[in-house]
Amino acid sequence: MRRKVIAGNWKMNMLPNETISMITELAPKVKDTKNEVILCVPYTDLFYALLTAQGTNIKIGAQNMHFEEKGAYTGEISGSMLRSIGVEYVIIGHSERRQYFGETDETVNKKVKAAFKNGLKPIVCVGETLEQRESGKAFEIITNQTQKALEGLTEDQVANTIIAYEPIWAIGTGKTATNDDANESIKKIRKKICQIYGQNVSERVIIQYGGSMKPTNAKKLLEMSDIDGGLIGGASLKVEDFSAIVNFDR
Ligand code: 13P
């Protein structure tokens, strides 16, 4: 049985004082869950988040990283920098980064490799636009994105990658994929991984759903056969909402 992994993506929200109070309030509410709890916070909050989450079951992640180790890349943060302060996870290839910051399948693949090299666990985002969905290309798009992101990894690394299927039209829009549609897309991603890396790997890899997940729809989504967790934007900013999603099965 795969574990459920519930990750918050705060995006460009929250100051250090808000980070400290949010995690302080959240920790007792999620301490008894058997699900994995991750918060991916802005760079400026990482240190405060790590300190506040110490001794709790809340793990901390970043939202992006550069693929080079160091050098003349003004404004960038490397995997070794993240790891050096105790960060465990990093979101790679979020659709907002692909859309606004020129992230490509190639840079995503480089970043995934650099994440593993530095002992970070990548959460790799894939997802189709509404236009791609309506023209029947969704499965092709998401399986291609997955294949390219994982290129050159060992089987063990693939098994330890978290994939987040986030249909772009469902992000921040209040529109959620139906439970069946989300499950179907995730099955297609798993099947692709099975074709390339074998069944053992594909049955181990965690594939989350993301896009307007909230307490009212989380339980049904998270109970589907292939949905192994959620990557949650808006609802991860509120203790009540996020803890309710983490505790969907309690
Ligand atoms: P929302 O939950 O706000 O739709 O955001 C989803 C997302 O992009 C998480 O990475």
Image (cartoon, grey):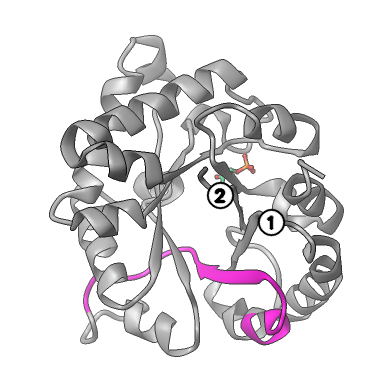
Disc 2 designates what residue? 3
Residue 206 as seen in the image, left or right of residue 172: left
- Counting the numbered discs, the total is 2
**Residue matched to label 1:** 34
Q: Is residue 205 above or below residue 25?
A: above
Residue depicted at x 19% and y 43%: 148
Q: Would residue 197 be found to the left or right of residue 172 on screen?
A: left
Dot 2: element: loop
Q: Quadrant of ligand 1?
A: top right
The magenta segment is 50-68
The CA span between labels 1 and 2 is 8 Å
For the residue pair 77 and 32, the one nearer the viewer reads as 32
* Marks 1,2: beta carbons within 8 A: yes
User: Toward which corner of the image does residue 145 lie, by quadrant?
Assistant: top left
Q: Earlier in the sequence, mark 1 or mark 2?
A: 2
Quarter placement of the C terminus? top right
* Secondary element at image label 1: loop
Camera-side residue of 31 and 165: 31
Q: Residue at position x 24%, y 86% from top? A: 70
